[in-house]
Image (cartoon, rainbow, N blue to C red):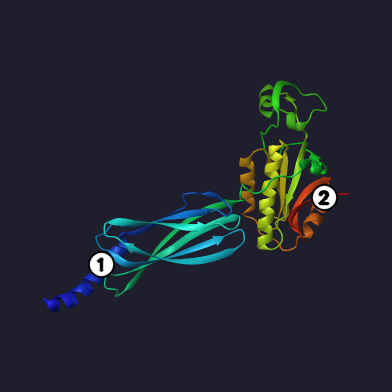
Amino acid sequence: MILVLVIGAPVLSIIGVFILKWGIDLELTAPQSEVRRLDTGFLHLVLGNRTIVPSMECEIQLKSSNTFYGSESVTMIELPVRAMGSFEEYIPIDYTMNGMYAFEIEDIRFRDMLGLISLRKKINVKAEVTVLPETERNTEFNTSDMSSGMTESEETIKKGHDFSDVSDVREYIPGDKLMSIHWKLSAKKDSLMVKDRVAMSDQQMVVLTELAGRDEDVDEILSLSYGICKAFMADQILIRLMWWSEMAYEFHERQIINEEDLIEAFQSMYYEKIYKDPDMTRGLMRSIRPELKAYIDVCMTPEGADTVVVEQD
């Protein structure tokens, strides 16, 4: 019997680990898809096993990256594999910088019960978390001092957004602004119809967020820019948020009416590439967007991230 056990146990252990490879699986989720900078979030790992074969050693390599800054790290995690069951683990993550955090597990490695051989199974599970600037940041800005950064808005960028109440609809009169045309109703009536507005504002604040410099500089610029936009929104000032896209080699812009628009704009920024020369931004603005007479430049100064009102000739 001892001889049978000595010979049979290793064979059963090796056969069992191949059965385990068929039955083992892993899930990776981020319970919070959006968090704030400096918050602590969690990743949820569920290691499941459909077989009766357990394993005392399962190694998981978790790859973490902030795709906006291009930073990466690897964390090794060891979990037990339960027979006919699952094991859950919540992994705390400190989100120290703004950006898009990507988490990925490509495979898992596990050993048989006797530790004779090790197998690898491809898993390829992913999760993403958007990290937005902290809401507690001081947003006590004197918006009246930045009135020179206002510019006339002839047409909305985001289709269908009105910035005031519509009191009536009438036929188009030469001189009416294009943004006041009711396009759907005009198509039905075969003539241009215009929305009469109450307290219509034709102006908006242009805010340029510079994605230039060191990673930590851009991180501070993002937080400051978010806070400034929140302050303008609180004062019911319309915002045109702009940034230079190094990949598209053009300025991208978003009309900001509410916080949902602001979050979507920052999520779009997180897919951009940081450029190293902050001095080129204003030159590009002068050459590409000369029609903007003034704007608020959120940039890095010797004193740190700050705002500068730039008036273009």
**Most foreground residue, 266 or 284:** 266
* Residue 18 visible in the displayed image: yes
Image spot of residue 84 (x, y percent): 26, 57
Mark 2 Cα shell of 10 Å, populated few (<14), some (14-19), many (≥20)? some
Judging depth in this view, the residue of 107 and 113 nearest the camera is 113
Q: CA distance from mark 2 to mark 1?
A: 70 Å
Identified at 18% across, 74% down, the residue is 8
> Which residue is at the front of the view, 136 or 55?
136
Residue 48 located left or right of residue 266: left
Above or below, 190 relative to 11: above
Counting from the top left corner in percent of width and height, residue 37 is at: 59, 53
Where is residue 65? Give x, y as percent.
55, 61
Residue at the (73%, 25%) spot, across then down? 197
| Residue indicated by mark 1 | 16
- Which residue type carries mark 2? Val
Where's residue 97, x and y in %?
A: 60, 57
The answer to whether 216 appears left or right of 18 in the picture is right
At 62% from the left edge and 47% from the top edge, which residue is drawn?
Answer: 136
| Relative depth, front residue between 98 and 143 | 143
Three-letter amino acid code at the position of disc 1? Gly
Query: Can you see residue 247?
Result: no
The answer to whether 102 is drawn above or below residue 193 in the figure is below
In the displayed structure, 154 sits above or below 71; it is: above
- SS at mark 1? helix
Name the mark nearer the viewer: 2 or 1.
2
Residue 256, disc:
none
